[in-house]
Image: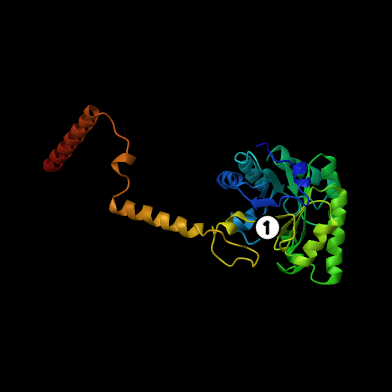
Amino acid sequence: MAKITAPAILARKGGDKIRMVTAYDAPSARIADRAGADIILVGDSVGNVVLGRGDTLTVTVDEMVHHTAAVMTAAPNALVVGDMPWLSYHTSVEETVHNAGRLVRDGGAGAVKLEGGRKRLPMIRAILDAEIPVMGHLGLTPQSVRAMGGYKVQGKTAALAHELISDAVALAEAGVFSIVLEGVPDVLAEYVTREVDVPTIGIGAGRDCDGQVLVFHDVLGLHDGRLPKFVRQYARLADVAAEALEAFFADVQSGAFPSDEETYHMPEESAQILRDLNLRADHLMADEVMER
Ligand code: KIV
């Protein structure tokens, strides 16, 4: 199978649903790729999910490059999208292109994603001019958590919905290859999906988007705690992992691990010489104690 590209995702508009999941390191990327992900997003959610922070705002470009490069080593098929962290595309067009370029050149990403609508258009156009495909992200944009006053569903009134639709149309016209719609009512996501000619990828946006994305650790039940309403947990791997580790620790305690098969051996002749040496050392130590 050939590596999936941004134009190939764009061509999926209205066709087969696009399957996207986050990943932040090589083992998770390998699993996602093997399971058939079309897109692996190295999300700035790495801040909360993997680095144990309260939000995504502290994530840096260096950290995103580091995680994107790890994912790239293990995703032979999926398109890898690197998330642009907060303040990496807000201060100037030059800095924005430089940072997007770092995700591609140093991280190996096939595209970048950034949050926001019309007010980000100059930055989006500049990245596109640098030949880097861009994925948009509208609705509940976690980097705006302070401005939104919390993680709240967006676009719930007709006026706000209208703003979001105008943002989506503007992004599509600028040339993004897809748009993530996060935390918006299903009717609004459906409207946007019909209105724009690029694929929409929903997370908490109902079933009518052109694709869906979830966070790797949420889908697999890799962490405890309250999950958003839109998450469906397909496994509880944290429980499976804890049980496996408990079994390992119990075997260590009882001496059942390692077994003979899990141990390196040397030829019996050499082993015997070592045993004899040990015995002699024991005798020497015992003689020394007697002399004292
Ligand atoms: O960072 C992230 O994981 C995301 C997805 C939730 C879309 O932006």
| Horizontal side, residue 2 vs residue 133: left or right | left
Q: Residues within 10 Å of mark 1 (few under 14, many from 20)?
A: many
The x and y percentages for residue 128 are: 83, 43
Query: Which residue is drawn at the image coordinates 64% and 47% (left, top)?
Result: 37
- Visible in this render: residue 52? no
The x and y percentages for residue 130 are: 82, 39
- Visible in this render: residue 278? yes
290 or 66: which is nearer to us?
Answer: 66
| Horizontal side, residue 248 vs residue 231: left or right | left
- The scheme the figure's colours follow is rainbow
Residue type (three-letter) at the residue carrying disc 1? Thr
The x and y percentages for residue 33 are: 61, 44
Query: Which residue is drawn at the image coordinates 28% and 50% (left, top)?
Result: 255
Quarter holding ligand 1:
bottom right
State which quadrant residue 68 falls in: top right
Q: Disc 1 designates what residue? A: 56
Residue at mark 1: C-beta within 8 A of ligand 1: yes
| Residue lying at the far left of the rendered structure | 290
